Image (cartoon, helix red, strand yellow):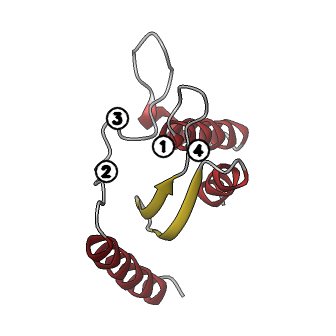
Amino acid sequence: MIVINSLHLLVQQQLIKINGYVIMPNHIYLLWEHLCMNGKEFPENIFEKFTAKTLINKMKQMKDMALKNYVVTTTNRQHDICLRNPLAIKVFSKEVAEQKLAYVRLNKKENSKKYI
């Protein structure tokens, strides 16, 4: 629900349009369209910050011992939840967008079979 809430926030703020997504156990596939930036901040940065911050707070609240696996020694954060350079592919044609959306749907179908 943390990922869903984060996406919902971006849609409400009219920063993105979601064309398709699937949430996997350890990653997500997401096909979205950037509508605008939030000041100088890109929607993906807002998504990562909101998602990571919410997840960290929830793990702290639940005293989840797995949080120690995400501790980092940088000066600007205590934990690193998201990959620093996620695999993001810009889509410039309708054909490629349809191919990516078909891939998302296939993964959604396969993922739903595993976790029912």
Q: Amino acid at mark 3?
A: Arg
Quick one: which residue is furthest to the top in this view? 75
Q: Position of residue 12 (x, y in %)?
A: 73, 53
Vertical arrangement, residue 76 with respect to residue 90, above or below: above
Residue 93 picture quarter: bottom left
Q: Element under label 4?
A: helix
Q: Residue at 61% across / 35% down in the picture?
A: 53
Task: For the residues labelled 1 and 2, say whether their Cβ atoms are less than 8 Å apart.
Answer: yes
Q: Residue at x 41, y 23 (%)?
A: 72
Q: Which residue is mark 2?
A: 88
Q: Closer to the observer: label 4 or label 1? A: 1
Q: Which of the two discs, 4 and 3, labels the residue nearer the N terminus? A: 4
The residue wearing badge 4 is 51
From mark 4 to mark 3, how far is it between C-alphas? 14 Å
Q: Which residue is mark 3?
A: 84
Mark pair 3, 1: CA separation: 12 Å
Task: Find the distance from the CA under tag 4 to the CA under tag 1.
Answer: 10 Å
Quarter of the N terminus within the rendering: bottom right
- Badge number at residue 44: 1
Dot 1 surroundings within 10 Å: few (below 14), some, or many (20 or more)? some
Q: Secondary structure at mark 1?
A: helix
Of circles 4 and 2, which is in front? 2
Examine the rendered structure and indicate whether residue 34 appears above or below residue 46.
Answer: below
Report the residue at 48% width, 33% height from top.
68
Q: Tell me the mark number nearer the camera, choosing from 3 and 1.
A: 1
4 or 2: tag closer to the N-terminus: 4
Q: Are marks 4 and 3 in contact (CB under 8 Å)?
A: no
Q: CA distance from mark 2 to mark 3?
A: 11 Å
Q: Amino acid at mark 4?
A: Thr
Between discs 3 and 1, the one toward the N terminus: 1
